Image (spheres, rainbow, N blue to C red):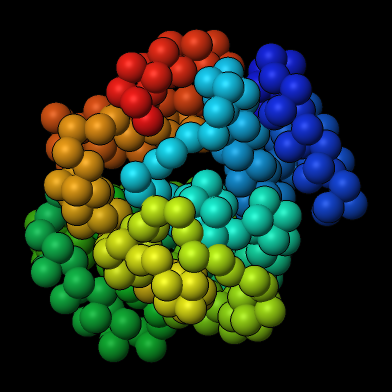
Amino acid sequence: MGADFAAASPAARARFEEADEILGLPLSRLCFEGPLAELTRTDVAQPAIYVCSLAALAALEERLGRPLRPAMTAGLSLGEYTALAAAGALSFADGLRLVRLRGRAMQDASEARASSMTSVMGGERDRIEALCAAVQQETGAVCQVANLNCPGQTVVSGEIAALDRFEARAAEEAGALRVVRLNVAGAFHSEVMRPAADRLGAALAETPFSAPSCPVWQNATAAPETDPERLRANLMAQLTAPVRWEESFRGMVAAAGGVPFLEPAPGRVLAGLARKIDRGARVLSLHQAEALEPVAAELAGAGV
């Protein structure tokens, strides 16, 4: 991923080269060539996605001939770091170091306790939360709502024994239409990640944050934030708290006044969620280099 942006844009290529130098590893080669088994490890995937997203932004700004002027930013889970860098609250280098540590800490926490995540289609959220609480009490194992992504889609994190029991009872007790165990390293956004949050918190305390150029809507609060100390605290909280994406996006749509949203990322996950949350919201996907020209034209026309 990202090879097309590096080939099409000197600015994007410079981002990858800078990342290789900062991390002291061939991240660009892993992004462009794999192997997939290594690239998809949490401790590698997180810096890779962060760099690819900001390389895409750099390519777009190069095409526009000026910096972007976002009215607000947000990102889902790891994407919140991209959002903070895009808003100027974090430097590219500091964000990359944090993301690298975050990935390592989450990988270590995942390996320490057998855990995973389950996507729940349908169901009532209050009943899903109640079932999580009941299963956690019965098993003594972690079982928490981790992502509130869009209408009809909730993700639950937990230790394996708890998830097994939750899945067996989800249809009858929570009204779920379907449950799908996700292929992830561990129970992200749950108490399983507490050791990772503690490690990340220490690094966050030593990392300089600036006031962002625009509000950043944060996962843990589903609210816009500009205070550097609260931005820092909410990043730490995010590892063990639910990602409130649906609520965040609804708030952003209300505040945007019809201005289009931009998703500079490998894939179009947020664009897909946006359609389920508010079909009237316009999301421009910058997921490959061939989208640079049409996206630049739309943004120029919108005065963004």
Q: Nearer the viewer, residue 32 or 144?
A: 32
- Would you say 163 lies left or right of 196 here? left
Q: Nearer the viewer, residue 76 or 262?
A: 262
Give the vertical position of 192 relative to 287 (above or below): below
Q: Nearer the viewer, residue 288 or 169?
A: 288
Q: Position of residue 285 (x, y in %)?
A: 41, 25
Task: Decide if residue 282 is in sight here.
Answer: yes
Total labels: the figure holds 0
Q: The C terminus lies in which quarter of the figure?
A: top left
Quarter of the view holding residue 52:
top right
Q: Position of residue 145 (x, y in %)?
A: 30, 68
Quarter of the view holding residue 197:
bottom right
Residue drawn 11% across and 69% down? 126
Residue drawn 69% across and 61% down? 94
Give the vertical position of 241 relative to 255 (above or below): below
Residue drawn 20% across and 72% down? 129
Residue drawn 12% across and 55% down? 123
Q: Position of residue 291 (x, y in %)?
A: 49, 15
Task: Decide if residue 103 is in sight here.
Answer: no
- Would you say 169 lies left or right of 78 here? left
Quarter of the view holding residue 144:
bottom left
Q: Position of residue 169 (x, y in %)?
A: 20, 65
Q: The N terminus lies in which quarter of the figure?
A: top right
